[in-house]
Amino acid sequence: MILPVHDLVRERITAALERQYALGPDAMPAIVIDYPPNRELGDLALPLAFELARRLRKAPALIAEELAAALGSIPGIARVEATKGYLNFFLDRRAFLGERLGVGAPPLAARPTPGAVKTVVEHTAINPNKAAHIGHLRNSALGDTLVRALRFRGVPVEVQNYIDDTGVQVADVVVGFRQIERQDLAGIRAIADSTRFDFYCWDLYARVADWYEADKSRLQVRLDTLHDIEHGGNEVADIAAFISDRIVRCHLLTMARMNVQYDLLAWEGDILRLHFWARAFEILKEKGAVFLQSQGRLAGCWVMPIEDEAAPAAEEGEAPAADEDDSREKVIVRSNGTVTYVGKDMAYQFWKFGVLGKDFNYRVFSQRADGEPVWGTCQEAAAGEPAHPPFGGAGAVVNVIDVRQSYLQKLLKQALSAIGHQEEADRSVHFSYEMVSLTHNTARQMGYILSPEDAARPFVEVSGRKGLGVKADDLLDVLVKKAAEEVVKRNAELSADEVRRIAEAIAVAAVRYFMIRFSRGKVIAFDIDEALNFEGESGPYLQYAVVRANNIFQKLRDREGIGEAEFLSPLSTTRTEELTGGAHGHDLWALVLEAARLDEVVDQAVRTLEFSVLAKYAFGLAQMFNAFYHRFPILNEERDDARRWRAGAVSYFRNQLTGALNLMGIPVPPRM
RNA sequence: GCGCCCUUAGCCCAGUUGGAUAGAGCGCCUGGCUACGAACCAGGAGGUCGCAGGUUCGAGUCCUGCAGGGCGCGCCA
């Protein structure tokens, strides 16, 4: 962990600037900490002198030298050099690695995360009417990694999964069962008990689309069904409830394969039945956030004015374009009195922040693999569990939803602001990401016939098409099968069960790494062959690096009967030539320093919601280890001091990369 | 029409609040297994960072304009 060192350096620099140049708190520049291009130049680099040159009317090189002299000794810092205007810090290598291996002085206390308020993260939110597809995997991989990263930083997190059980998607499957298959609840239950129900509905949903297509008048059936579902208390509603319950359970199993878990499932039906919207509507009206439009094409609708932040009010010279009469309004309640999708979302968002003044009832929906309960909202107090944990009431909310929802997410912030909760609006974050498509090659492999329109584009958009797409479980199954073949090739003695478990872990790594490695604003084209290629930059590559490191200590136990901790404990008194001097001291140290940057990288990833930096960091670290491993013998090294320092570096690297993988939800198999 | 995003090697992508010589992977070429396992490593070829201005000691990174591409802007969800 490097951030405590950063903090100490900043603290000392600030003090030195005060002493040397009488800079007050207001004049203090931001202290940037970089890394020099190589370890011979130092371990931390501060371009501070360039920043101060103009203000102090001095050459950067001179300022750097003065600061280096003024700093005095800093615990953990061996020396400070001024080079070409940079202020370069050299860490005390023995103390640094010793602390992190627990064989020397206790490490600097990690700083508390500033503003660590309870954070609600909502992700996944798959329509509960068919199997999860490949696009959902990007959502849950990003969302779950965010959750893990926040918890790593000490932020209390509540993971919610929103279940839209009252929308047209569920209604369509209900229509399919009743109109096409002529099934009643009992018949559907029998199907659910005897098939992969989410797969069954996947196909049925496609058939319903065709059924509508064949006779457009049938769309009236959909409307009637939707109406029945919203009303409740009839068999149609019971069927819808049954279907969404069963499909959600399928989704939870799929996500569990990916090591994704939830604390609470929030059901849209409960938001309706508990009249969350009615309460939110009262608040919106009370605060004047919405008004009843009396004229124009939106007459009779309750609307919210849309702020156009593109027209800055700062320009006072010109009158705002109010006379254009295009001041935009978003319909919240239709003229027929029903609430729109946005309205329901506003009520849910208000509840998340604890500003709605109402709460759900809660029941245990299912059990996670780790034994913890997954809670679900429910309507009836009688059906609820009185002793439930507190839900909602967050200080910050992150909604993980694809970029197409940007407009609506912006409206949620505006609504919070409009009802006088500016702080909640500021802490209402849309974690957006681009879509997942397929490469042409993969689309063909999945049996698509490419239209001329598709062929003209660089990739094939499929997740929006009814009944098309790649099912998440199918993808995982293919990956597991392929991984198992590779494992068997290399470990002929393993049992089928062991191979299966290892292959599952590899498949998870392949998918989760692929979903994380691209920056979120980029459309990614999923390619089966690339995902199946376990060479190069991939999740399995990372796992392999850790497995290799673990094997070293396994060999140590097998050959010499010595445990890892015992082997490393003499390091506090071992001579440090291997670590500090010699021709290759920098190689070993570079690995240690890079491994230490995990906390800094996580910090950056959370700040920018950009988890590709975590993926790339982990990959670079693994590469660095593989090169080191190849170049330097560890157990086979003859000099005892070199042997132990190398093992120490490997041990620390292994701990840190394992931690990075854990943040990405990637497990480390015992062998590969 | 308005708004947001993308444009870096043949392909696919990293590049931190602006910092030292623009980096990986794939593909191509050359070389390396004596198990701390080669799902690996070493080396090579490959660059006008979309274009044009600007700010700065310093710009792939910030600002303005332009071009190409994607997405959004429903009394759908």
Image: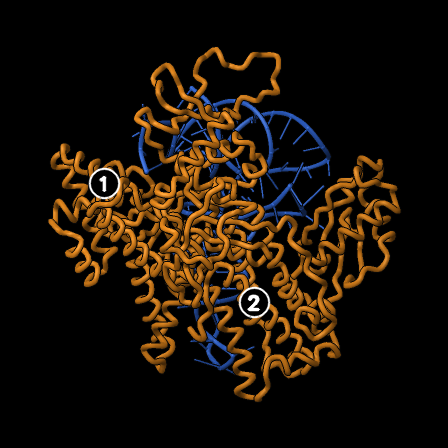
Residue drawn at the location 39% of the way across and 64% of the way down: A367
Q: Nearer the viewer, residue A516 or A577?
A: A516
Q: Nearer the viewer, residue A534 or A287?
A: A287
Q: Position of residue A306 (x, y in %)?
A: 47, 25
- Which mark, residue A627? none
- Name the image quarter holding the N terminus of chain A: bottom right
Per the image, the residue denoted by label 1 is A228
Q: Position of residue A120 (x, y in %)?
A: 50, 49
The image quadrant of residue A79 is bottom right
Q: Nearer the viewer, residue A128 or A376?
A: A376
Q: Colour of chain A?
A: orange
Q: Nearer the viewer, residue B62 or A142?
A: A142
The chain letter for the residue carrying disc 2 is A
Q: Secondary structure at mark 1?
A: helix
The image quadrant of residue A262 is bottom left
Per the image, the residue denoted by label 2 is A625
Q: Secondary structure at mark 2?
A: helix
The image quadrant of residue A228 is top left
Q: Are marks 2 and 1 on the same chain?
A: yes
Three-letter amino acid code of the residue under disc 1: Asp
